[in-house]
Amino acid sequence: MADTEKITINLGVVDLGKIDLLVDQGFYTNRTDFIRTAIRTNLDKHESQMNKTITRNNYVVGILAYSASDLQKKVDKGEKMDIHVVGMLTLAKDITPLLARRAINSLKVLGIYRASDEVRQALEHITEFRSI
């Protein structure tokens, strides 16, 4: 599984020209290098606030994956899960819509959310998903 995700952005021609100028002058190796550096700089700038929000909202940061057996264990204990992820959530293909509804109380994903279309539909009333 790749640890990067391809995104598309739209930039004004002047901003793009300025990026190309910095690349031409040797400050960055290419446009992607500039954009990655700009993103990391801004993430670092806001790190303290992000960490407070992550703690306050009980987010898991990183890649989280559940299988049907993981969810079934929660159901067997009479528990429902509140899943809050910054990064990526994968609900395995062996998870049925019924099991997902029985095991998951709430679902919030900031990043990438992978699940079958049937499971997504079964959980859409409790799901908050944001992605670029």
Image (spheres, rainbow, N blue to C red):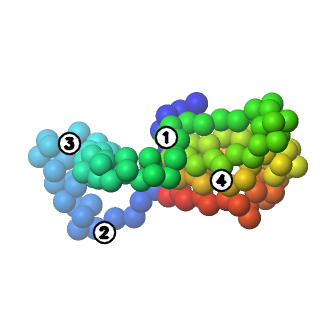
Q: How packed is label 4: few (under 14 Cα within 10 Å), some, or many (20 or more)?
A: some
The amino acid beneath tag 2 is: Gly
Q: Which quadrant, please, contains the N terminus? A: top right
Q: Nearer the viewer, residue 60 or 114?
A: 60
Residue occupying image coordinates x 49% and y 40%: 61
The amino acid beneath tag 1 is: Val
List the residue tagged with mark 4: 107
The image shows residue 17 at horizontal and vertical percentages of: 22, 61
List the residue tagged with mark 1: 61
Q: Secondary structure at mark 3?
A: loop
Q: Is residue 117 left or right of residue 16?
A: right
**Spatial separation of the CA atoms under disc 4 and disc 1:** 14 Å
The amino acid beneath tag 4 is: Leu
Q: Earlier in the sequence, mark 3 or mark 2?
A: 2
Instruction: Find out whether the residues at labels 4 and 2 contact each other: C-beta distance under 8 Å.
Output: no
**Spatial separation of the CA atoms under disc 3 and disc 1:** 29 Å
Q: Is 97 situated above or below 124?
A: above
The amino acid beneath tag 3 is: Tyr
Residue occupying image coordinates x 44% and y 48%: 54
> Which numbered dot is residue 28?
3
Residue 51 appears in view: yes
Q: Nearer the viewer, residue 68 or 35?
A: 68
Q: How packed is label 3: few (under 14 Cα within 10 Å), some, or many (20 or more)?
A: some
List the residue tagged with mark 2: 12
Q: Nearer the viewer, residue 104 or 18?
A: 104
Instruction: Find out whether the residues at labels 3 and 2 contact each other: C-beta distance under 8 Å.
Output: no
Q: Earlier in the sequence, mark 4 or mark 1?
A: 1
Q: Nearer the viewer, mark 3 or mark 1?
A: 1
**Spatial separation of the CA atoms under disc 3 and disc 2:** 19 Å
Q: Is residue 32 left or right of residue 7?
A: left
The image shows residue 27 at horizontal and vertical percentages of: 14, 43
